[in-house]
Image (tube, rainbow, N blue to C red):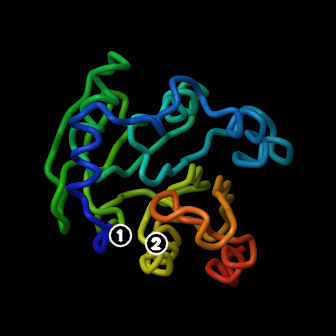
């Protein structure tokens, strides 16, 4: 989040102020798994590579990994990465990333990863796989609105030519609320993603 203040997020994590973090798997993910993975078209046994931008320590990644998928998240705050692995009792390695400041946290089986870095700098130069799907739980509305086009470019660079994108976002009346989460309309999402939707 190059134009956002990472210090604000770091302060929230270090102070234990993670009220946005769900203690269980997101209901919207559970209700839309077939949409995310394409299981209705390809059968239940097809394993996918799924990307979760600005993942924090979401239980959704544990759920997806448990189904056999390869799951990678990106999170700028290091304490969130550590909490994710330690709170879920997952043995992990931590190695420096190449081409960008940060680290890769990875489970022993390699199917569960968190890239600890500025998401907007995450590219195919850093990530060695292309993803089949994206599970975006309000990442788009958490970043500074002026970073949205760069966000879409970053996400798109990590995806296969054929991909699925499941987005949870928020829309409210203009000026009804200032700050995160930032409102975005359905039309604005369509315009942002343009030919990719």
Q: Position of residue 61 (x, y in %)?
A: 50, 35
What residue is at 45 percent from the left and 63 percent from the top?
179
Nearer the observer, 95 or 20:
20
What residue is at 77 percent from the left and 48 percent from the top?
35
What residue is at 19 percent from the left and 56 percent from the top?
97
Is 78 drawn above or below residue 57 in the view shown? below
What residue is at 67 percent from the left and 73 percent from the top?
189
Is 127 drawn above or below residue 156 in the view shown? above
Q: Position of residue 144 (x, y in %)?
A: 42, 70
Nearer the observer, 105 or 84:
84
Which quarter of the figure is the N terminus placed in? bottom left
Is 145 drawn above or below residue 95 in the view shown? below
Nearer the observer, 166 or 183:
183
Q: Residue at the right extreme?
A: 40
Query: Would residue 152 appear left or right of 98 to someone viewing this image?
Result: right
Residue 174 location, quadrant: bottom right
Q: Position of residue 47 (x, y in %)?
A: 63, 39
Q: Residue at the top extreme?
A: 89
* Element carrying mark 2: helix
* Element carrying mark 1: helix
Query: Would residue 107 appear left or right of 69 to someone viewing this image?
Result: left
What residue is shown with label 2?
151
Query: Would residue 166 appear left or right of 15 to someone viewing this image?
Result: right
Q: CA distance from mark 1 to mark 2?
A: 6 Å
Q: Are marks 1 and 2 in contact (CB under 8 Å)?
A: yes
Nearer the observer, 103 or 7:
7
Disc ID at residue 120: 1
Query: Would residue 41 appear left or right of 106 to someone viewing this image?
Result: right
Other-residue count near label 2 (Cα within 10 Å), few / some / many at <14 / 14–19 / ≥20: many
**Count of all numbered marks drawn on residues in the image:** 2
Residue 68 location, quadrant: top right
Counting residues from the start of the chain, the first of labels 1 and 2 encountered is: 1
């Amino acid at each position: 989040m190059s134009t956002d203040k990472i210090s604000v997020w770091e302060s929230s994590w270090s102070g234990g102020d993670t009220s946005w973090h769900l203690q269980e798997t997101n209901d919207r993910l559970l209700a839309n798994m077939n949409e995310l993975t394409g299981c209705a078209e390809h059968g239940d046994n097809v394993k996918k590579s799924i990307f979760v931008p600005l993942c924090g320590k979401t239980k959704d990644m544990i759920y997806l990994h448990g189904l056999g998928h390869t799951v990678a998240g990106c999170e700028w705050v290091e304490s969130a990465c550590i909490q994710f692995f330690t709170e879920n009792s997952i043995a992990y390695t931590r190695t420096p990333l190449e081409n960008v400041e940060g680290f890769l946290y990875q489970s022993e089986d390699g199917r569960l990863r968190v890239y600890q870095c500025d998401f907007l700098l995450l590219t195919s130069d850093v990530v060695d796989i292309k993803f089949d799907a994206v599970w975006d739980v309000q990442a788009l509305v958490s970043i500074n609105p002026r970073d949205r086009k760069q966000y879409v470019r970053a996400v798109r660079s990590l995806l296969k030519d054929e991909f699925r994108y499941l987005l949870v976002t928020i829309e409210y009346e203009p000026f009804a609320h200032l700050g995160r989460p930032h409102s975005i309309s359905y039309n604005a999402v369509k315009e942002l993603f343009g030919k990719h939707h």
